[in-house]
Amino acid sequence: MTTEQTAEHTAQHAADIDYIDHTVLITADLAATSARYEALGFTLSPVSPHHLAERPGGPLLPTCTANRCAYFGQSFIELLGIVDPAAPDPWGVHELRRTYRGLLMTLGSRDIQATAERLRATGLTSTGIRALEREVATADGPRTVRADSVRIDAAHTPEGALQTTQHHTPQYVHQPRYLDHPNGAVGLRSVLLVVPDDEIDDHEERYARLLDTDVWIEGPKHVLPLRHGRVEIIPESSLCDFLPGHAVPGLPLLAAHTVAVRDLTTARKLVEHNLIATHATSDGFYVTAEDACGVPLAFTQN
């Protein structure tokens, strides 16, 4: 089965989760992190504070976080800033920042109720469904972004916090004015999970249950393809093959994310023009964790 056929089969088979919605980079300095991502060639949305309800239809409460995002039309990168440390922290963002030294990841669901029920049935317990709202500016005035999310139980996610989300107002998220990026980025290609060599089969099995998808092998990579994006699992001993020179701070870890761009040469020239070092990979280049605000960011050809 070809890669395209596998992805098509997966999309048809998946009952609910079928794409990587976004990656999350937590920061205590949203302004500095935003400036760096703009230097990496991303167009970012304006600052947007979060309000959260414990249940769909429940009262919305202010939280300690706000975000800026690089939107691609389907997926996005979220820069999640702790902007008011004293404000309520219903998602436990302070603890997430202390606990995980890599990315957080949100998976896209077509049916959040079905996702919640399936995860409970497969033993991946969760918070239940929570409603998220935040006000955003649009060309037609202020609008409210609405989504429902399910957090995967932390006991089942040692590599980093995971949740699934169903968007109800995607048109207010992926606004056309934010989709044109100087670096030519068009979407999240993948998220890289690095695990101890002797645990790769266990992590593969867990993600196959989580995503309800097939697994295929690309050399040392165990790949779980989705309709949009893919999760790649590699043993620690192969890390230098994909991120030369990078050392992970702990295992298992959601250690890097990759964006697809229209033209690699253009993207690399822009990054280097902004005095940010790049490092060659087998299918593109990457920027180190130190130069990308804590987590390596890789670029590949669309």
Image (cartoon, rainbow, N blue to C red):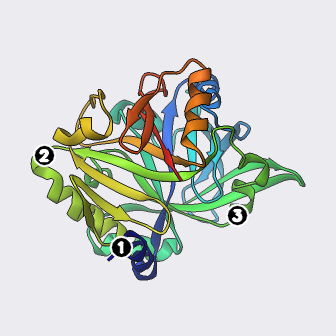
Between discs 3 and 1, the one toward the N terminus = 1
Residue 23 higher or lower than 231, as above or below: above
Provide residue 200's location: percent of width, then percent of height: 17, 53
Q: Nearer the viewer, residue 60 or 282?
A: 282
In three-dimensional space, the C-alpha distance between marks 3 and 1, rounded to whole angstroms, equals: 34 Å
Discs 3/1, front = 1
Q: Which residue type does callout 3 highlight?
A: Thr
Q: Quadrant of residue 163?
A: bottom left
Residue underneath mark 2: 197
Residue underneath mark 3: 169
**Quick check: 137 above or below 287?**
below
Judged left or right of residue 62, residue 264 is left
Circle 3: element type:
loop
Q: Is residue 247 above or below residue 167?
A: above
Q: Position of residue 216 (x, y in %)?
A: 27, 66
Q: Can you tell which of label 3 and label 2 is closer to the viewer?
A: 2
* Distance CA(mark 1)–CA(mark 2): 27 Å
- Say the numbered circle drawn on residue 2: 1
- Label 2: state its secondary structure: helix
Please name the residue shown 36% across and 56% down the image: 231
